[in-house]
Amino acid sequence: MHVLVVGGAGYIGSVVAAHLLNAGHTVTVYDNLSRGHRAAIPSQACFVKGDIGDRAALDVLFQSFQFDAVVHLAAFIEAGESMQLPGKYFQNNVVNSHVLLDAMHQHGVKSLVFSSTAAVYASKNAPLQEDDPLGPSNVYGETKLMIEQMIRWYHDRCGLKYAILRYFNACGAMLEGGVSQNAVRGEAHQPETHLIPLTLQVPLGQRERILMFGDDYPTPDGTCVRDYVHIEDLAAAHILALEALDEHSTMTYNLGNGRGYSVQEVVNVARMVTGHPIPADVVARRPGDAPILVASSERVNDELGWQPKFPALEDIIASAWAWHQSHPNGYEDMT
């Protein structure tokens, strides 16, 4: 297949593009590089710089290539920022996704894999199932849910085949030759907002301490609990879902390890992996943080045979640590 990876210069998108190439597919990456990095894009992929909100550019793109499918990973993802700048998220995530969906329809591209999130759910003290109540606690999650709803209507009215993949904390780094080998793609957000890379900035000497937002949540140690999924496991799920679209015209799957780790547990494991004390301070809660979000992946296990290869938090953080040690300035070290 010839697959268009929208947002393919980003953290998850670049790893998905690499896995698609490894699986024998042809890949074109479309990205405006506002959050992604040119150096992250696999060299075997064709790259077109552009924005999914630019309909004229999308028309040229779809006229220039014959795509069999689209993998959509182009979204702003910072939950905290979304609560401060909701309009920015509705415009980029929802409005621009509609432009993409309509361009796909007009140019006859009928297969889509969409990168969604467990943030579409209401918080629950047990692993979330796909049929559990939806109730985003932040604008980011709301925008992803709105995109899901648009996708379902394009299926119903226009024949779009889709796989919606809901996951929470993508983490770790893509490794060349296994866990102990070279880390070739990792997190390099500007600004960085994710817990694991922020925590690892302390032993790198880039910040003095890590902040934990609230220790009075209804969780075992009072800090928020999240499901952490290795980036390579997520990428593998995207490939399985894409290749299953011929057989299943609609799919919605959670992708998770089935257990959660608290903020305090993540910091403790990072201390163990790095050998650094990593000072931590508790500060006030942030708006929009649900106490617990853990995604059950039983359905995707049963239907597509997907199982995480790197479920242990120690392995996830070790791969991230390998990336940040070798690329302390992110992709700036590769340019």
Image: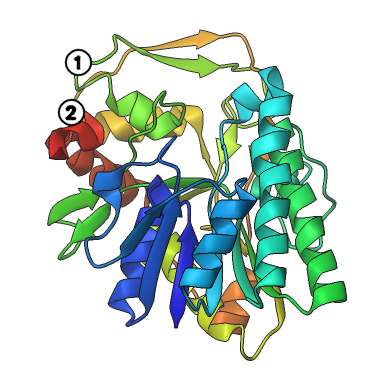
In the image, residue 229 lies at what x, y percent?
46, 53
Q: Of helix, strand and loop, which one carries label 1?
A: loop
In the image: residue 299, left or right of residue 255: right
CA gap between label 1 and label 2 equals 13 Å
Q: Nearer the viewer, residue 198 or 72?
A: 72
Looking at the image, which residue is at 32% across and 13% down?
A: 279
- State if disc 2 and disc 1 touch (CB < 8 Å): no
Q: Is residue 284 above or below residue 51?
A: above
- Residue 226 picture quarter: top right
Can residue 258 be seen here? The reply is no
In the image, residue 112 lies at what x, y percent?
62, 70
In the image, residue 164 lies at what x, y percent?
66, 64
Looking at the image, which residue is at 44% across and 30% down?
A: 195
- Residue 258 picture quarter: bottom right
Q: Nearer the viewer, residue 31 or 21?
A: 31
Amino acid type of the residue that numbered disc 2 sits on in the rendered structure: Gly
Q: Of helix, strand and loop, which one carries label 2?
A: loop
Quarter of the picture holding the N terminus? bottom left
Of mark 1 and mark 2, the one earlier in the sequence is 1
Looking at the image, which residue is at 77% across and 39% down?
A: 136
Looking at the image, which residue is at 67% across and 33% down?
A: 89
* Residue under pointer 1: 205
Quarter of the picture holding the C terminus? top left
